[in-house]
Image: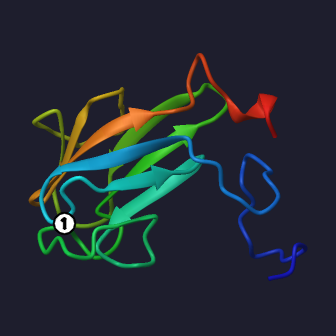
Amino acid sequence: EKKDDPDKTLSFYDAGGTEPVVGWLVCVEGAYLGEGFPLKAGRNLIGRSMKMDVPLVKESGVSRERHASLIFEPKKRVFLVQPGDSSGLTYLNEELLLVPAEIHDFDLLQLGGCKLVFRSLCGPSFSWEKYI
């Protein structure tokens, strides 16, 4: 892949081709019990397709593409979650998610039969800017 490709989205953090992890989703209920999904800066799309940033392929209750998205906004160092373009419902801490909302450590995200706990790395006390 060429570095000067105008169609390639560039990472907020330039780590020499690596997307630094800014947080994780860890499955606590469902087909991925005990597994973690790394999150990158910017928008992380969640769905059943392998094209998604968080691919929940084995979760039949999750929409194929864009069931929801989890965003790390690096300028303010905050995480947001928002419902996707699909008909599937998303819950944040047992409440139906209809508009973007901040998500915090140990908050619970539910998509179909999959429950995921959120955990951040980046935030007020850590940023990749010091290291990259």
Crowding at label 1, few (<14), some or many (≥20) Cα neighbours within 10 Å? few
Residue type, label 1: Ser
Answer left or right for 51 relative to 58: right
Task: Residue 56: give x, y in percent of width and height.
Answer: 28, 68
Please name the residue shown 16% across and 33% down the image: 93
Residue drawn at x 86%, y 80% is 2
Left or right: 55 in relation to 86 = right
Local SS, label 1: loop
Residue 122 drawn at (x, y percent): 57, 31
Q: Quadrant of residue 6?
A: bottom right
Quarter of the rendering containing residue 131: top right
Q: Is residue 87 left or right of residue 64?
A: left
* Up/down of 86 relative to 118, above or below: below
The one nearer the camera, 60 or 85, is: 60
Q: Is residue 5 above or below residue 9?
A: below
* Number of callouts: 1
- Say above or below: 51 vs 125: below
| Residue 115 point in image, percent of width and height | 16, 49
Residue placed furthest toward the top: 125
| Residue found at the far bottom of this picture | 1
Which residue is tagged 1?
Answer: 87
Q: Quadrant of the C terminus?
A: top right
Furthest-right residue in this view:
4
Does residue 89 appear to the left or right of 5 in the view shown?
left
Residue at (30, 47) in percent of width and height? 26
Q: Residue at x 23, y 71 (%)?
A: 63
* Quarter placement of the N terminus: bottom right
* Residue 106 position (above or below residue 83): above
